[in-house]
Image (cartoon, grey):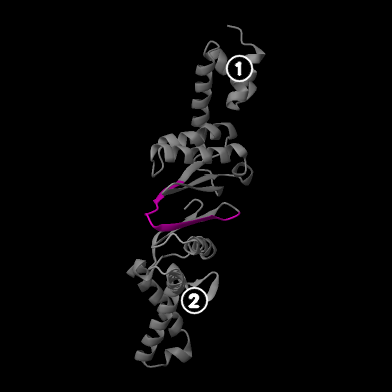
Amino acid sequence: MAITASQVKELREATGAGMLDCKKALMETDGNFDEAAKLLKEKGLAAVAKRAERTTSEGHIFIRQNGSKIAAVGLVCETDFVSKNESFIAAGEKILDVIFEKGYTKVEDELTNILMDFAAKTHENMSVSTVAVVDVPAGASVGSYVHSDYKTAAIVVVKGSEDDKVKEFARDCCMHLVAYTPSYIKQSDVPQSYIDEQKEIFMTQMNNDEKVASKPENVKQGILAGKIKKHLAEVCFVDQMFVKDDKMTVAAKLDEIGKDVGAKLEFGDINLFVLGK
């Protein structure tokens, strides 16, 4: 059957595919708009699959709270241009809509397909890299923060009070996480293998320092213990000096805020999101 220019234009506007591709798809489906759109989508998704090995170092992190749940979604793509595209951002917001509607807590095919509709039009490799949903307990405060480049973000729950000071502290903790990107939350989270590796590194450095290498073994062990203690304080969130008060650790600031509001506070879920990780 004859394919009109208006049919091709309509299909192109709906799918973002090229004029020739749209005309060919309509011809192959005898002018059936829905079948032609489906065919183009299938071809587009096949093209996306071929691009799957291309680097995706750009993207956008989204965070939204809905009642007692707060969700984070990370989308990755190839270029900064696409990461700022209105349709790409709209896909992220739509994915959040579906997460709250369906109760998803991880990447699901339905969420991926929302992004693939856009990927087929842009010819870029992109994916849903992160889906996380945090439940906020009754009587707790939650803070969230997405950095201005949308590549790092955090969610922090503080249990024990819903006071505005606690909510502000929870958000400040999110800013701290994004600023310092600690490797661990507390020292009990640090694997022994990591500590052993650091000990080897420090011992090598000490043995290469003539002044330290000549000291008695018990003295060197004391120096080593001090180095490990200092290092762990630098890589563990609660032991780092607080971003808004460098004279006090995060843990100490938590206690101080608790005294201010007359409540026993403790951290709940702590999440740091780094795009693509």
| Residue 192 position in % (x across, y down) | 33, 70
Q: Secondary structure at mark 1?
A: helix
Apparent side of residue 267 relative to residue 46 in the rendered image (left or right): left
Residue pointed to by mark 1: 23
Q: Position of residue 25 (x, y in %)?
A: 55, 18
Q: Residue at x 57, y 41 (%)?
A: 89
| The quadrant where residue 215 appears | bottom left
Q: Earlier in the sequence, mark 2 or mark 1?
A: 1
Q: Secondary structure at mark 2?
A: strand
Please tell me whether residue 164 belongs to the stretch shown in magenta: no
For the point 65% across and 19% down, the residue is 9
Nearer the viewer's eye, disc 2 or disc 1? Answer: 2
The residue under label 2 is: 248
Q: For the residue carrying disc 1, how many other residues have a C-alpha within 10 Å: few (<14), some (14-19), or many (20+)?
A: many
What's the distance in space between the residues labelled 2 and 1, CA to CA? 67 Å
In percent of width and height, residue 168 lies at 51, 62
Question: Is 276 placed above or below 262 here?
Answer: above
Task: Report the amino acid beneath label 1.
Answer: Lys
Does the image show residue 236?
no
Q: Is residue 133 magenta?
A: yes
- Vertical relation: 266 (above or below) 75: below
Labelled disc at residue 13: none
Numbered disc total: 2
From the viewer's side, name the closer residue of 213 and 15. 15
Main SS of the magenta part reads strand
Does residue 68 sit above or below 178 in this rendering?
Answer: above
Q: Name the amino acid, label 2.
A: Met
Residue that extends furthest to the right in the rendered view of this protein: 5
In the image, which residues are magenta? Answer: 130-148
In the image, 5: left or right of 221?
A: right
Q: Pointer 2: residues within 10 angstroms few (<14), some, or many (20+)?
A: some
Residue at image x 51%, y 18%? 34
